[in-house]
Amino acid sequence: MELTFQHFNYVAELMAKEAAIVLAAGKEYLVESRLKPLATKGGYETVGEFITAAGRVRDNGSHQLRKQIIEALTINETSWFRDREPFAALTNVIIPTLLQNELHRPIRIWSAASSSGQEPYSIAMQLDKALPPEQEYEILASDISVEMVERTRRATYNQLEINRGLPVGDLVEYFERIGSDWHVVDRIKRRVTAEQINLAHPLPLMQPFDVVFLRNVLIYFAPETKRQVLARIMKVLRPGGWLQLGAAETTVGIESNFERVPVGRTAIYRAPSIDLLPVKEVKAC
Amino acid sequence: MLGIVIDDSRAMRRILRKFLEELGFDVLEAGHGREALEVLDGADAVPELALIDWNMPEMNGLEFVVEVRKRPEWRNITLVMVTTESEHSQIVKALASGAHEYVIKPFTKDGMLDKLALLGLVPVGVLS
């Protein structure tokens, strides 16, 4: 059974309902390629059969299959220090601005679609280098996929993953090799807490954040969901806190109170506050 | 841009040559470190990039890196080890000898692209 229009429609509706992700027509190849390994593993001859089984709501096992579909279609390819500029903006603008006044508390950062953990650990490595030793920091990593959250908690990466954009100096400094894999060293790993969070649903109770990385997430959401997600993020950001979006994303076109602050070839977004500290930028060496 | 691929495996040289050519590099080749030094001495221009295997006959990649570092006229060559040597201590040794970056085999095209972007040798965001 090949992937029919009905199969694709079913998956598109499932993704819209459960993850608020829009799968437009033309994304059939994505569904096919992401679900093929699951279908094979489950003993189904085709992706179509796998989707049909997932759609049998009276079948006890089908809930698990639907969960697998959602996880498979929400995984993004990721690499260390992806796009580089957001990390430069973090240490050249956000941190210097935050540290203009002495902070008697940890800096809190949320990596809101952290996939397998490369982003939150990249942030931790960047902060380890940039912050004075007495300045504490903590990072929340979240993803819709339980499997990705588990992977982030394990903090273990294979060689192919390690090759993806990780400067060798950081590999040597922040990883230890165990067998053929690489583990994030404990002093970095302990900075990151990973939780399963669906951004399309109301957020759990959280301490406020200084910075939220929400990169390459909004592109998958319909405009109304984008608005809701940004409104929720605004609520968990400290006044004057910062939002980092993906290179192809903006808050333009969505009612939003964020101020756009250009940095290099990119831009970061700042939540309003009655007493905003002036933006302080330091040039990278 | 000019690059040199130094590897005793002809198949690997072919793969890396094709990869660099797709990025717009002209490519020199050598089968071991000593041959690479000869190729560099005879070349019209100094390459911007060298992709260097570690284990090779005659002169290994690490010895080659040390030799390049002795020659001021080659100081602008970016030296990238591309090797199966993946022990932490080996990587530290390569960096201490003067290598700029390190790619562990097996690697993907995207992984290699990421490294070259990191080194400023291809623009960030070049698609494979």
Image (cartoon, coloured by chain):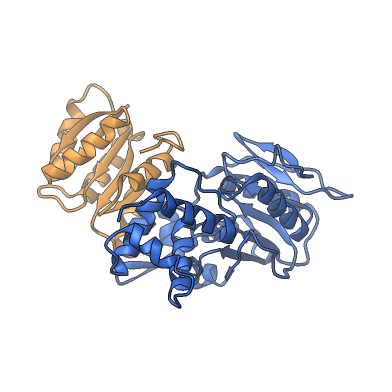
Say whether residue B92 is visible.
Answer: no
- Taking the spot 33% from the left edge, 35% from the top edge, the residue there is B77
Q: Vertical placement of A153 versus B51: above or below?
A: below
Residue A71 location (% of width, % of height): 47, 63
Q: Colour of chain B?
A: orange
Q: Is residue A238 left or right of residue A47?
A: right
Q: Where is residue B64 in the image (x, y as percent from the top left)?
A: 22, 45
Q: Is residue A284 above or below residue A164?
A: above
User: Quick check: B71 above or below A90?
Assistant: above
Task: Please name whichever residue, A175 or B59, is drawn nearer the observer in this view of the structure.
Answer: A175
Residue most toward the right? A274
In the picture provided, is B120 more to the left or to the right than A244?
left
Foreground of the two, A211 or A144: A144
Percent coordinates x, y for residue B115 in the rendering: 38, 45
User: Is A120 rendered above or below residue B12?
Assistant: below
Taking the image as drawn, is residue A50 in sight?
Answer: yes
Decide which of A97, A26 is in the foreground and name it. Answer: A26
Give the colour chain A carries in the figure.
blue
Instruction: Tell me the quadrant of the picture where the C terminus of chain A can be found.
Output: top right
Q: In this view, does A218 lie to the left or right of B21?
A: right
- At horizontal 49% and vertical 70% (from top left) the residue drawn is A57
Q: Which of A123 and B96 is in front in this view?
A: A123
Quarter of the image that includes the N terminus of chain A: bottom left
On the image, which quarter does residue B71 sit in?
top left
Tally of numbered tags? 0
